[in-house]
């Protein structure tokens, strides 16, 4: 069974109804480690060696965060800048993360309709996540489409329940070695056919 590391970054986690629900649903799953960066590093003083050890021990890396200003909260950016070092994560000798699966799990206030060329955000979620995708590619990881919970401000309890169940199901599928062809046009893991059969 593949081991999953959820690198969770939310500076106001206790006020996030949606993220509380998602994290509470998956935190006790077998072979899943939920690593809350803001709880671990309130002073932003990241223990790089401890983070590398965690990465080495897991097969699936999830960057779970709210979509702040079309990106991630500052502590996650600092984590990326400090932990993914040259000749460890990338470069001629940087092989530590090769062939691991990597993806973003994000929450957005805006709905799917506003994230497109015709919407007021002008670009798709996948386009905004290109820096994460290229980071994963540079590190030799297999980058999968994001799992996204969108329109969080108006999300019903029933819809949120479905999202949290599907988040758990996505992790189950990944741990069972789900393969996603990078040439497929899947924009979100939420939409993969395998979820419909569970």
Image (tube, grey):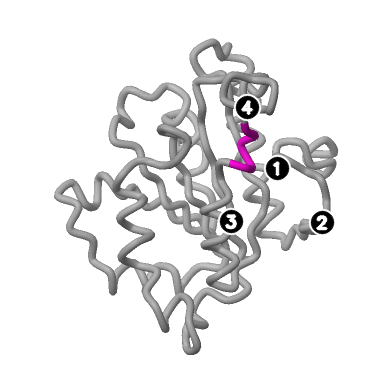
Is residue 43 left or right of 125 when viewed as pictured? left
**What residue would you read off at disc 3?**
133
Q: Where is residue 161 in the image (x, y as percent from the top left)?
A: 60, 23
Instruction: Identify the residue at horizontal 63%, vertical 73% (top origin).
Output: 99
Q: Give the range drawn in magenta.
A: 123-127
Q: Name the residue under label 1.
A: 189
Mark 1 neighbour class, 10 Å CA radius: few under 14, some 14 to 19, many 20 or more:
many
Q: Which of marks 2 and 1 is in front?
A: 2
User: For the stretch drawn in magenta, what is the main secondary structure?
Assistant: helix
Q: Which of marks 1 and 4 is nearer the N terminus?
A: 4
Q: Badge 2: how crowded within 10 Å, few (<14), some, or many (20+)?
A: few
Say whether residue 101 is left or right of residue 183: left
Secondary structure of residue under mark 1: helix
In contact (CB < 8 Å): disc 1 and disc 3: no
Q: Which numbered tag is attached to residue 183?
A: 2
Report the quarter where the C terminus lies. top right
Q: Give the CA separation, mark 4 to mark 3.
A: 18 Å
Does dot 2 land on a helix, a strand or a loop? loop
Q: Where is residue 36 in the image (x, y as percent from the top left)?
A: 34, 47
Which residue occupies the foreground of this view, 29 or 150? 150
Residue found at the far left of this picture: 43
In the image shown, does 42 or 136 lie closer to the viewer?
Answer: 136
Frontmost residue, 136 versus 62: 136
**Residue 161 relative to residue 54: left or right:** right
Q: Earlier in the sequence, mark 1 or mark 3?
A: 3
**Residue underneath mark 4:** 115
């Amino acid at each position: 069974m593949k081991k999953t590391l959820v690198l969770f970054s939310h500076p106001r986690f206790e006020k996030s109804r949606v993220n509380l629900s998602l994290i509470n649903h998956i935190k006790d799953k077998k072979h899943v480690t939920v690593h809350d960066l803001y709880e671990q590093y309130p002073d932003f003083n990241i223990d790089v060696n401890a983070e590398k050890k965690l990465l080495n021990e897991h097969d699936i890396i999830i960057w779970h965060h709210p979509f702040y200003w079309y990106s991630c909260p500052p502590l996650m950016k600092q984590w990326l800048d400090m932990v993914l070092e040259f000749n460890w994560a990338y470069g001629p000798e940087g092989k530590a993360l090769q062939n691991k699966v990597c993806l973003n799990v994000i929450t957005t206030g805006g709905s799917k309709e506003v994230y497109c060329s015709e919407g007021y955000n002008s670009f798709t979620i996948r386009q905004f996540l290109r820096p994460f995708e290229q980071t994963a590619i540079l590190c030799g990881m297999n980058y999968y489409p994001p799992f996204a919970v969108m329109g969080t401000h108006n999300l019903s309890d029933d819809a949120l329940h479905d999202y949290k169940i599907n988040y758990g199901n996505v992790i189950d599928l990944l741990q069972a070695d789900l393969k996603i062809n990078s040439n497929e046009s899947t924009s979100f893991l939420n939409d993969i056919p395998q979820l419909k059969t569970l």
